[in-house]
């Protein structure tokens, strides 16, 4: 880690704040929290139920990243998706408070043009590329 690591956390903090707001959902309903490689990972309990709701852009999801917070259905899913979600952490470190609006606008634009708003989103393309 270099001397400027606190700036990455500060720049990504607006996204992290969204994730931090959901951590108690896991903790107060039987889920858990762990700290892995500088990232808070929350899982289980009612958080898993919330993530499986059909209102998400791609339907039910296994894990989602907000800044330096990753929310997942369970510990195994967090472990399985860790490399993918860490790409999103790095994207938040680059885009900071602009990440969420940029992600949503990209999805809307792609969807309006007939593409898959999730899989064709360049942020997801980058994250899935590490799995190839």
Image: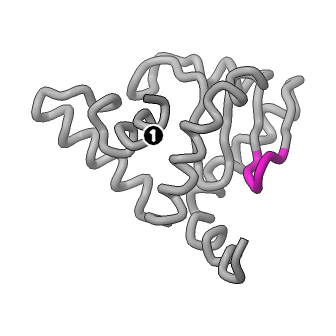
User: How many numbered marks, from 0 up?
Assistant: 1
Q: Secondary structure at mark 1?
A: helix
Q: Position of residue 122 (x, y in %)?
A: 31, 44
Is residue 97 shown left or right of residue 44? left
Q: Position of residue 58 (x, y in %)?
A: 40, 23
Question: Which span is picked out in magenta?
Answer: 35-40
Q: Quadrant of the C terminus?
A: top left
Q: Is residue 100 above or below residue 127?
A: below
Q: Is residue 21 above or below residue 111?
A: below
Residue at (76% x, 56% y) in the render: 38
Question: Does the segment drawn in magenta span residue 37?
Answer: yes
Quarter of image, res 115: top left
Residue at (19% x, 37% y) in the render: 110
Residue at (44% x, 64% y) in the render: 95
Question: Does the segment drawn in magenta span residue 131?
Answer: no
Q: Position of residue 81 (x, y in %)?
A: 61, 30
Quarter of image, res 47: top right
What secondary structure predominates along the stretch shown in magenta?
Answer: strand
Q: Position of residue 45 (x, y in %)?
A: 80, 22
Residue at (27% x, 33% y) in the render: 120
Q: Quadrant of the N terminus?
A: bottom right
Q: Which residue is mark 1?
A: 127
Is residue 34 shown left or right of residue 2? right
């Amino acid at each position: 880690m270099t001397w400027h690591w606190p700036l990455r956390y500060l720049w990504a903090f607006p996204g992290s704040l969204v994730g931090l707001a959901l951590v108690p959902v896991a903790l107060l309903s039987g889920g858990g929290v762990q700290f892995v490689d500088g990232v808070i990972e929350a899982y289980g309990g009612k958080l898993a139920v919330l993530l499986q709701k059909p209102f998400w852009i791609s339907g039910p999801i296994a894990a989602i990243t907000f800044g330096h917070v990753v929310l997942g259905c369970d510990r195994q899913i967090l472990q399985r998706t860790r490399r993918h979600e860490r790409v999103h952490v790095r994207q938040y470190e680059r885009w900071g408070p602009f990440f969420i609006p940029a992600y949503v606008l990209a999805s809307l634009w792609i969807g309006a043009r007939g593409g898959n708003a999730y899989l064709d989103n360049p942020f997801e393309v980058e994250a899935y590329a590490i799995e190839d």
